[in-house]
Image (cartoon, grey):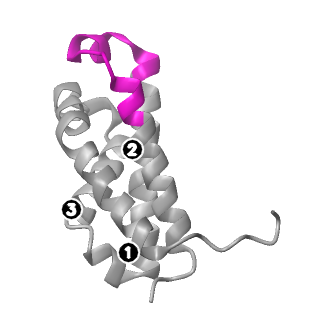
Amino acid sequence: MMHPKSPKYLQDILEACELIQTAAAGRTLADYEQERLLRSAVERNFEIIGEALNRIRQNDPALAARIPENRDIIDFRNLLLHGYDSIDHSRVWEIIQKDVPRLDGQIAQLLKEAGPPPHSPEE
């Protein structure tokens, strides 16, 4: 059974994937390299993805194991946070193009399996 917080983390990842894909749609690597605001938005959402996965790994290791690249994604988040001055924009762009759509699909499937999230008391 999935940890009670896992669906929320999965939803956060899904929304971050979708924002990254929307921000990059119709753009090029040159656009990405030149537009600081675009890079900031994308990098922030990669940080959200990595942190949400890190929390899943801590609270729900069985679920984390179903996301094959979870360790690489968390490491990428750490690089963005701590190695901000050595980020390879072409590598980030490649991840946006190849890896984010695949992760989006994996997370959507896991959310579907989890069913509707329970309502929080604040709602």
Mark 2 and mark 1 residues within 8 Å of each other at the beta carbon: no
Please tell me which residue lies in front, 38 or 86.
38
Measure how far apart labels 2 and 3 are at the Cα level.
15 Å
Q: Name the residue under label 2.
A: 17
Q: Is 3 one of the magenta-colored residues?
A: no
Dot 1 or dot 3, earlier in sequence: 1
Q: In which quarter of the image is the C terminus?
A: bottom right
Percent x, y of residue 54? 40, 66
State the SS at label 2. Answer: helix
Q: What element carries label 3?
A: loop
Q: Which amino acid, mark 3?
A: Glu
Q: Residues within 10 Å of mark 3 (few under 14, many from 20)?
A: few
Report the mark closest to the observer, 2 or 1: 2
Residue positioned 20% across, 67% down in the render: 68
- Amino acid type at image mark 2: Cys
Q: Identify which amino acid the numbered label 1 is placed on.
A: Arg
Q: Is disc 2 surrounded by few (<14), some (14 to 19) or many (20+) residues within 10 Å? A: many
Q: Name the residue under label 1.
A: 57
Residue plotted at (38% across, 12% down): 35
Disc 3 target residue: 69
Residue range highlighted in magenta: 20-38
Report the side of 79 relative to 88 (left or right).
right
Determine the CA span between mark 2 and mark 1: 18 Å
